[in-house]
């Protein structure tokens, strides 16, 4: 089988992606979560190199010009991007690498790497989304409004994803995501090494070797 695969998880801000990712990492050991760079300020409790690599706008633009990102995007006035080095080295070691990124970045990755699995996580209703954003208490009302507005724009692109996962129950959601990733490994387009090996063996048989 091929080495690790690339998985993109997106979802409205407040959909609970962060919690799902933490739980997925805790329950299974074959996943590596990519750590993004961002120009937004750290939230309380966030640690450099754990949630994000925090950069100034200028530092971020320098990294863009050096071609250090697989993808990057602007989201509610800040830059976010996925550094390439970590992703490719983890995949090379056989890990499935998960990018928790927003839609513009997700579509860039799918275009560059069509075998990527794209999953969109959403709360069951828009009302519930708002409730979770307000309840989180980490953003002021203007930022919450901006994020809800952005969610409205993002909803237009949900149908570009391979799967939609409704986050109603954390445990169910984590299992579902794990199953989707396992399924992705069996896609013929992700099994070219296996296919080539068995083809070569069969060729040898048919030649009477
Ligand atoms: P937050 O500020 O809430 O941490 O993240 C805002 C949005 O940026 C979320 O939708 C998150 O998934 C997305 N995001 C985080 N890292 C990246 C990245 O490297 N690239 C892109 N395109 N989006 C990202």
Image (spheres, rainbow, N blue to C red):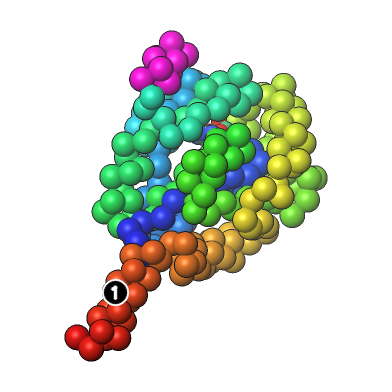
**Residue 58 highlighted magenta (yes or no):** yes
Q: Residue at x 47, y 25 (%)?
A: 38
Crowding at dot 1, Cα within 10 Å, few <14 / some 14-19 / many 20+, comes out as few
Quadrant of the rendering where the C terminus is positioned: bottom left
State how many labels appear.
Answer: 1
**Residue 173 highlighted magenta (yes or no):** no
Instruction: Farthest residue to the top: give it.
Output: 58
Instruction: Farthest residue to the bottom: give it.
Output: 208
Horizontally, residue 182 falls left or right of residue 204, namely right
Query: In terms of image quarters, where does ligand 1 lie?
Result: top right
Residue 106 coordinates in the image, percent (x, y): 56, 41
Q: Which residues are magenta?
A: 57-66
Residue 205 appears in the picture as rendered: yes
Q: Residue at x 37, y 50 (%)?
A: 32
Q: Main secondary structure of the magenta part?
A: helix
Classify mark 1: helix, strand or loop: helix
Looking at the image, residue 107 lies above or below residue 29: above
Residue nearer the viewer, 138 or 152: 152
Residue 162 coordinates in the image, percent (x, y): 62, 56
Q: Residue at x 59, y 53 (%)?
A: 119
Horizontally, residue 51 falls left or right of residue 8, namely left
Which residue in the structure is indicated by mark 1?
200
Q: Residue at x 59, y 40 (%)?
A: 107
């Amino acid at each position: 089988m091929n080495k690790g695969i690339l998985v993109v998880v997106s979802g409205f801000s407040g959909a609970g992606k962060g919690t799902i990712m933490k739980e997925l990492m805790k329950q299974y050991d074959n996943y590596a979560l990519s750590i993004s760079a961002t120009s937004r300020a750290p939230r309380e409790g966030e640690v450099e190199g754990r949630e994000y690599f925090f950069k100034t706008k200028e530092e971020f633009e320098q990294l863009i010009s050096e071609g250090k990102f697989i993808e990057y995007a602007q989201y509610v006035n800040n830059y976010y991007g996925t550094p390439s080095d970590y992703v490719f080295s983890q995949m090379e070691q056989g890990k499935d690498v998960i990018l928790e990124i927003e839609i513009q970045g997700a579509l860039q990755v799918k275009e560059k790497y069509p075998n990527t699995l794209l999953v969109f996580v959403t709360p069951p209703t828009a009302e519930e989304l708002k409730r979770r954003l307000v309840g989180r208490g980490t953003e002021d009302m203007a930022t919450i409004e901006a994020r809800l507005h952005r969610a409205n724009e993002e909803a237009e692109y949900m149908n570009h994803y391979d799967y939609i996962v409704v986050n109603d129950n954390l445990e169910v959601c984590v299992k579902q995501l794990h199953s989707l990733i396992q399924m992705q490994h069996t896609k013929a387009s992700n099994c070219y090494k296996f296919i080539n090996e068995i083809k070569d063996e069969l060729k040898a048989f048919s030649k009477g070797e």
